[in-house]
Image (cartoon, grey):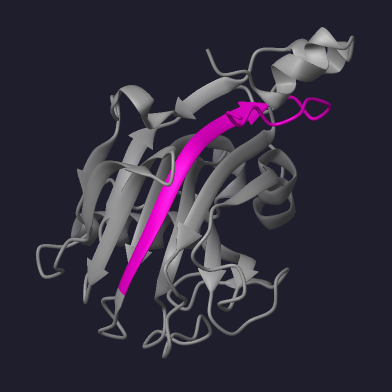
Amino acid sequence: MRRTLSAALCGLGAFAACAAPVWVGRFEGGAAGWRDVSLSKSLTPTRYALRDWDGVAAIEATAERSMSLFARPLALDLAATPMLCWRWRVDAPLVGADLATKAGDDYAARVYVSFVLPPDRIDFATRLQLSVARKIWGDVVPDAALNYVWDNRYPVGTVRPNAYTDRTQMLVLQSGAQRAGAWVAERRDLAADVEAAFGAGARPSQLAVASDTDNTGESARAGFADFHFVARDAACAFPT
């Protein structure tokens, strides 16, 4: 049986690492709870498939002028386990994308977390906008969302509103081709990120992955694996 880093630290007496991680995307046994989510009938959907990729049980996303999500519901206590851990990879970043423009709003890989906000965090004008958007797009439109993206041009650490709506914030975690072609581990304080973007009290409702090329018309391939949440003082539990 494979040991995780957290298990190894726990065995050495690092008791903060002994809290069990909350797994939400461990694909060794399939993808139970995950499903394809199309955002529009007019969009070609991205293809998602399970595969063993260089020894990692993963979801492979293949985009060809396409966009759809591979998603699962998310319900957890961010106060207890605020740290989101995962691994991802891309064959290459996109060429013509530009997150500052609607025409360039594409990403070789993105991790998309949707949230429900407390009613007092949504003013009347925003409620009206969300109501109109949901009549067009359905329940896939969240109160708010964070997108962690593998970008092509903006530096790591860039945070800015989505080109279509400020209800979605884009956070650049990887940029360019330097780390393409290999698995990259990520660890984000999701609770801190959403509070910085939208204030306190946000409740996560959905986790999704995507490879998104409908605007630029490009092709891309990405992998996603090992999604889990841990306490702030615990190590990520990536299999070794």
- Residue 191: x, y in percent? 70, 39
Badge count:
0
Instruction: In this rendered view, identify the residue nearer to me: 31 or 12.
Output: 12
- The residue drawn where x is 40% and y is 53% is 223
- The residue drawn where x is 17% and y is 61% is 45
Region in magenta: 220-240
The answer to whether residue 110 is above or below residue 238 is below
Q: Quadrant of residue 197?
A: bottom right
Residue 76 visible in this rendered orientation of the protein: no
Instruction: In this rendered view, identify the residue nearer to me: 25 or 80.
Output: 25
* Horizontal relation, residue 201 to residue 122: left or right: right
* Horizontal relation, residue 211 to residue 2: left or right: left
* Horizontal relation, residue 80 to residue 205: left or right: right
- Residue 14: x, y in percent? 88, 15
Q: Quadrant of residue 107?
A: bottom left
Taking the magenta stretch, the answer to whether it contains residue 230 is yes
- The residue drawn where x is 79% and y is 30% is 232
Residue 8 visible in this rendered orientation of the protein: yes
* Horizontal relation, residue 30 to residue 88: left or right: left
- Residue 73: x, y in percent? 37, 31
The answer to whether residue 152 is above or below residue 25 is below
- The residue drawn where x is 76% and y is 29% is 235
Taking the magenta stretch, the answer to whether it contains residue 131 is no
Quarter occupied by the C terminus: top right
**Which residue of the protein is positioned furthest toward the left in this rendering?**
41
Instruction: In this rendered view, identify the residue nearer to me: 45 or 203.
Output: 45
- Residue 99: x, y in percent? 51, 80
The answer to whether residue 63 is above or below residue 26 is below
